[in-house]
Image (cartoon, helix red, strand yellow):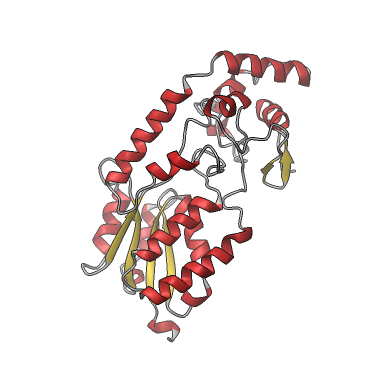
Amino acid sequence: MSDLAKHSILIYGNCQAEAIAHIARFIPSLRDKVRFKIIPLHIVTARDWETRYTAEWFDDVRVLWNQIESGEPTAHRQVLESRIAGDCQIVRFPPYSMLCLWPFSGSDPRIAVDVGYRYPWADSIAASLADEDLPDDALFDKYMEISSARMPDLERRLRMDVARWRVTDGLADIQVADWVLENFRRRELFYTAGHLTALPLGRMLKQLLERTGLLSAAEIFRATVELDFLLSHNKGQDLEIAPLHPLVAERLGIAYYDPDARYRWHGHEWTYREYILKYIRWEPFLE
């Protein structure tokens, strides 16, 4: 098939959708069949609709993989829907998110003013210690003492997560709640509250391919086999890994938790203690 004759699959969603699009573009047997386009809902602007995602840009879009959002449609989603052809197939999929693994992901005023995007995954206990002038051991011990004392009911937090998943599942063609609930304790699925390992990314991509009418059954089968190979050494969205609090791992029964593990933070591999101390002091990791 010539490049001009290709049809497109458009993926509209958050950074998870970006990761899915990146992987899909490397599936060998689909390169001559379709092109994958992406509109990232978390960074798209009103100007983008005028300059990048014009009506003409949508001319070859035959399938939309649409990551759903709860609530009223945003202005961006309304523009998207107005530009999709009436005969375009739409497959709706939910976002993966898990808040109970990081129970202190509240507010940190430093994030709003930090131009370096230093530590975007907030820790409200660490933020409260930002002005403490203590040696490493004393500062880390104080963090652990306060965070352990203020640890919320994690099973209740998990139930809240599950309730939210079921709401979004109800709006989608693909469901995730039962699978995440069954697997999150024994398999690492999340690096942060919204960044994923390769396992859920691959699962979602397979389910999207299986529901795509543009592809034949044989093409889908071949693509999923190739996808398994592509993901055999893929780590997913591992640029930033927010470590788990030891008490979270204990109370939720996280089987894969390793107290001696090192966590990737851009080009670094930090222990939990190193990460917490650097976060409290808001230390730069890029010079």
Residue 222 in percent (x, y) is at 47, 73
Say above or below: 267 vs 12: above
> Residue drawn 61% across and 27% down?
245
Q: Quadrant of the N terminus?
A: bottom left
Residue in front for this viewpoint, 130 or 126: 126
Residue in front for this viewpoint, 265 or 177: 177
Residue 36 seen in this snapshot? yes
Q: Quadrant of the C terminus?
A: top right
Residue 263 in percent (x, y) is at 68, 40
Say above or below: 6 vs 253: below
> Residue drawn 57% across and 53% down?
236
Residue in front for this viewpoint, 118 or 255: 255
> Residue drawn 43% across and 26% down?
157
Decide if residue 245 is on the left or right side of residue 216. right
User: Which quadrant of the figure has residue 50?
Assistant: bottom left
Residue 25 seen in this snapshot? no
Residue 117 in percent (x, y) is at 59, 40
> Residue drawn 39% across and 59% down?
207
Q: Residue furthest bottom?
A: 2
Residue 29 in percent (x, y) is at 49, 77
Say above or below: 1 vs 141: below
Q: How many marks?
A: 0
Decide if residue 48 is on the left or right side of residue 192. left
